[in-house]
Image (cartoon, grey):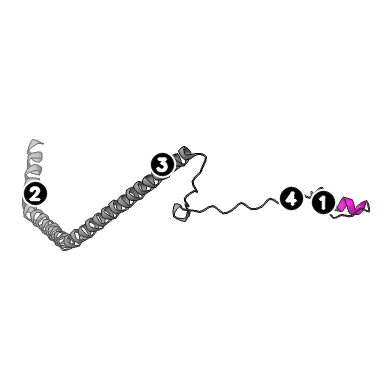
Amino acid sequence: AAKRRAAAAAANGEDPSPSPERVAPVPAAPAPRPSTTAEVQTEPLPPCARCPELTADLATVQEACDKATRRAEATATGAVATLHEELKRLERELVDAEARIAAMAPRERALSEREAALAARRAALDAERAVSWAPMGDAVAAASASSTVDAA
């Protein structure tokens, strides 16, 4: 909008610079706020000669705030310690589980070898059974054929 006004003013033969009446004052930047409670500087307020009750109330409130801050810090510290202990416990459980898995590997390998040996033995027995039953199968087939011939 300012560029358009300046262009229009130049086209009309006027001075394009803004007049002091139209220039808004630039507001002062607010003071930066502290980011944590540790950066807040608390200074004791000077006593108020006219309001001793207000000064006493202010001191009571400030003391209550200090106590609450200490309690919150202690609670946070305790929570961090508890979480740290829980993390250590979980790390120990992980190491134990990894050790148990590593110990199972040789047993797993031995079981796999036994299963392979049993499968090979089963195949050999099946083959032997097929060979040993073959003559009986021939005899049964011959008997079946002779009974069919007798029936005819």
Find disc 4 in the rendering and name its residue: 25
Q: Is residue 37 left or right of residue 10?
A: left
> What range of the chain is rendered magenta?
7-20
The x and y percentages for residue 22 are 81, 48
**Amino acid type of the residue that numbered disc 4 sits on in the rendered structure:** Pro
State the residue at coordinates (23%, 60%).
95
Write down the residue under mark 1: 20
Magenta span includes 16: yes
User: Under tag 2, what secondary structure?
Assistant: helix
Looking at the picture, how far across and down is residue 12, in whole percent? 93, 51
Q: Check whether the beta carbons of the residues at disc 3 and disc 1 lie within 8 A of each other.
A: no
Q: CA distance from mark 4 to mark 2?
A: 114 Å
Q: Of callouts 4 and 1, which one flags the residue occurring earlier in the amino acid sequence?
A: 1
The Cα atoms of the two marked residues, 4 and 1, are separated by: 10 Å
Name the spot of residue 102 as percent of width and height, x first. 20, 62
Q: Which mark is residue 137?
A: 2
Marks 2 and 1, how far apart at CA: 120 Å
Relative horizontal placement of residue 16, taking residue 86 as reference (left or right) = right
Residue type for callout 3: Thr
Q: Amino acid at mark 2?
A: Gly
Q: Is residue 3 left or right of residue 144?
A: right
User: Magenta span has 87?
Assistant: no
